[in-house]
Image: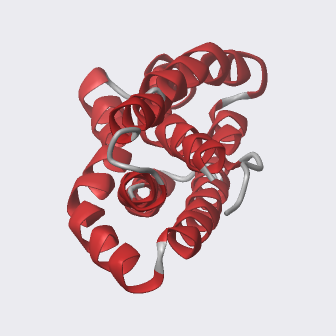
Amino acid sequence: MLVIALSVTLCANVFINGVAFLIPSLNSERGLDLAHAGLISAMPSLGMVVTLIAWGYVVDRVGERIVLALGSALTAAAAFAAAAAFAAAAAQSLVAVSAFLFLGGMAAASSNSASGRLVVGWFAAEQRGLVMGVRQTAQPLGVGVGALVIPRVADYHGVSAALLFPAMPSPRA
């Protein structure tokens, strides 16, 4: 279960942090200045911040397995929707892209609450420090994977294709 939680949290962090690696491509493909591209890239983080507590409540009610699976599926759906909105190439599509990135960040926040509870619920007190350390590696690993893959996909296939990368299948609880 820890491997699943680690994998889902890693993928969530690719979504939350990966859009920042598209800032140069947003400039070249849509002519966005740094402020507008930065605003768009902040949407997943904003979505995460506004829902972390709510996801904790849901985890307490239905359990970490359901939350990991549901949050992961919703994050993937938001990534598909953001990619489709970006491909529309209309000025209004950037508002839609931002909205879908915000919603995806809301969904991706689920992995933080669920994987934290997993550590407490599935491991003895003497193991929790080590397990929490293992769980926390998902964040820098997710950022690293995003940094390695997303700009390359954007360079060769465009921003719309790069937005699909976080929607790639991840382990489901």
Q: In screen coordinates, is 170 left or right of 7?
A: right
- Residue at image location 38% in from the left, 62% down from the top: 106
Q: How many marks?
A: 0
Q: In screen coordinates, is 150 left or right of 67?
A: right
- Residue at image location 55% in from the left, 63% down from the top: 68
Where residue 65 appears, x then y in whole percent? Answer: 58, 69
- Residue at image location 44% in from the left, 22% down from the top: 140
The image quadrant of residue 128 is top left
Q: Is residue 169 above or below residue 63?
A: above
Pick whichever, 76 or 113, lies toward us.
113
Q: In screen coordinates, is 10 left or right of 125?
A: right
Where residue 56 appears, x then y in whole percent? Answer: 30, 69
Residue at the outermost bottom position: 61
- Residue at image location 28% in from the left, 39% down from the top: 39
Where residue 82 appears, x then y in whole percent? Answer: 57, 54
Where residue 38 appears, x then y in whole percent? Answer: 30, 30
Pick whichever, 92 or 71, lies toward us.
71
Looking at the rendered image, the quarter that the C terminus falls into is bottom right
Q: How is the image coloured?
A: secondary structure
Q: Is residue 106 above or below residue 157?
A: below
Pick whichever, 144 or 122, lies toward us.
122
Q: In screen coordinates, is 74 left or right of 13?
A: right
